[in-house]
Image (cartoon, rainbow, N blue to C red):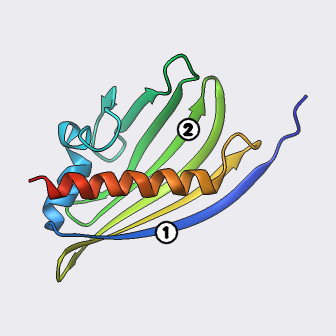
Amino acid sequence: MNERSVKHSTFVIERDYNASPERVFAAWSDASTKAQWFPKAEEFDFRIGGREINRGGPPGGAIYTFDACYQEIVQNNRIVYTYIMDLGETRISVSVTTVEIRPAVSGTQLIYTEQGAFLDGHDAPEQREHGTRYMLDKLGDFLKTE
């Protein structure tokens, strides 16, 4: 039997985007818009209690599943969701994420906070933070296109 472990971690990433809070919120809340910078969801129900699910991975490799449930939504201001991440049939993490969207002089300040439980050494907070930084950079690139 494998030894069980949990590594807890919290990370915060701040980004400034030259776009309105309404536009940044729409990039998170509209399925077709979000699919331009985040993996396309198989299920996308953006409401409190709604779910977002996507699956993917490298060709011929294991499948990662992102399964989120929206806990709190404040239009153009805040999104809070919980999510699990599975690798094949193995649960690798459980997280609570808060996305704060604040008006700023240059457009919008986004504050992304994730509190995670990383399970049995299958995932690491450093890897998740690295991937999230990349994702938020892709959001910034997308926001520059319109």
From the top left corner, tell me how far across and down residue 138 is, in percent. Answer: 31, 51
Quadrant location of the N terminus? top right
Residue at 33%, 47% (x, y): give it.
Answer: 48
What residue do we see at 59% from left, 46% from top? 94
Vertical relation: 119 (above or below) 54: below
Ranked by sequence position, the earlier of labels 2 and 1 is: 1
Outermost residue, top side? 60
Please state if 126 lies on the left or on the right of 21 as rendered: right
Quarter assignment of residue 77: bottom left
Q: Helix, strand or loop at disc 2? A: strand
Name the residue beneath numbered marker 2. Answer: 85
Question: What is the distance, in whole Å, between disc 2 and disc 1 at their CAs?
Answer: 19 Å
57 left or right of 108 in image: right
Question: What residue does disc 1 label?
Answer: 12
Kindly identify the amino acid type of the residue bearing the numbered disc 2. Met
Residue 90 lies in what quarter of the image? Answer: top right
Residue 119 vs 143, above or below: the answer is: above
Badge 2: few (under 14), some or many (20 or more) residues near its Cα, within 10 Å?
some
